[in-house]
Amino acid sequence: MTEAVPEAVKAALDDPFAQLTGSLSGTRRLQFEVVSSRELSPHLQRIELTAAELAGFSYLPGQDVMLLVATDGRRPVRRRYTIRYLDLASRLLTMDIVLHGDGPGERWVRSAKPGDRIEGIGPRGKIAAAPSADWHLFIGDDSAAPAIFAMTEALPGDAVATLVLEVPGPDDEQDYSAAARTRVSWLHRLGNPPGDPAQLVAEAAEVELPPGDGHAYLLGEAKVVLQLREVLAGRGIRPEQMSPKAYWGLGRANAGHGEPARDA
């Protein structure tokens, strides 16, 4: 059994999240143990975790858990991963995590094995499906796929949703099961680097926007998300109809709290 950050090390950290107050007041600390880890696709790893603290745990589809994956001196290094599934009866939480580099989160994901332990804090995240929207448009890269699928699968049967997802290649396409009426466009990078806005921005400019008051969820690389906002605004989508969220920033590591630095 391996502890991602041993207890003695955690006790000496200068941790801004030592107390779960303020924006973290609705979260709880979870002492996870890895149950399983397996490859879902060439660039996607599924990890199942259990914790006693999952008893009574609740979250909104699309929210995440922040894992303490490493330290940098006395500073904790955390990474945030979407909750893909939660089986409360079994206290089993599933995360699907993209593998695309060599950061501290990815190093932990690649090495995780049953019995390993890691601390989490959750649920986190403010973006959830807009219940009153006439239609839903989800646009993002592979880092956003778990959140997009989780939110889509939570929509009611009379909902209408369009999914636009950029992934490395055909082998990274995934199945999902949704009651809503959905259609999905898979965009393949085919060797191009992640974070290039060309494909997603072009699709945002052309994708059909049904009549009515819809909602767009724009998720992925920081500058790509900004460009997607601009394109959809130019097509008449109002700011309150968009939920943008940067998961990562091209060419720079996320901050210690697991998100892109504010100046990204």
Image (spheres, grey):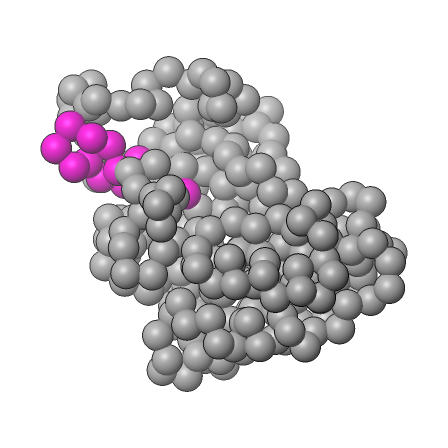
Horizontally, residue 252 falls left or right of residue 259, namely left
Of all residues shown, which one is farthest toward the front?
234
**Quarter where residue 185 is shown:** bottom right
**Measuring 35% from the left and 45% from the top, which residue is drawn there?**
263
Q: Nearer the viewer, residue 224 or 71?
A: 224
The x, y position of residue 173, in whole percent, is: 53, 73
Image coords of residue 187 (percent x, y): 54, 78
Rendered residue at 42%/30% (across/down): 121
Furthest-bottom residue in this view: 190
Farthest residue to the left: give it: 73
From this viewpoint, is residue 220 visible? yes
Image point 74% across, 61% down: which residue?
Answer: 236
The question of residue 92 being in magenta is answered with no
Q: Nearer the viewer, residue 102 or 251?
A: 251
Name the chief secondary structure element in magenta.
strand
* Quadrant of the image occupied by residue 6: top left
Q: Is residue 173 above or below residue 237?
A: below
Using the image, determine if residue 126 lies above or below residue 214: above
Is 198 on the left or on the right of 254, as rendered?
right
- In the visual, does 225 lie left or right of 254? right
Residue 123, percent from left and from top: 52, 33
**Closer to the camera in the image, 241 or 71:** 241
* Relative side of 182 to 195, left or right: right
* Region of the chain picked out in magenta, as a range: 68-80
Percent coordinates x, y for residue 188 in the rendering: 49, 80
- How many circles with numbers are drawn on the protein? 0
Tell me if I can see residue 152 in this picture: no
Query: Which quadrant, please, contains the N terminus?
Result: top left
Residue located 52% across and 49% down the image:
245
Between 94 and 206, which is closer to the camera in this rendering?
206
Q: Which quadrant of the view contains residue 221? A: bottom left
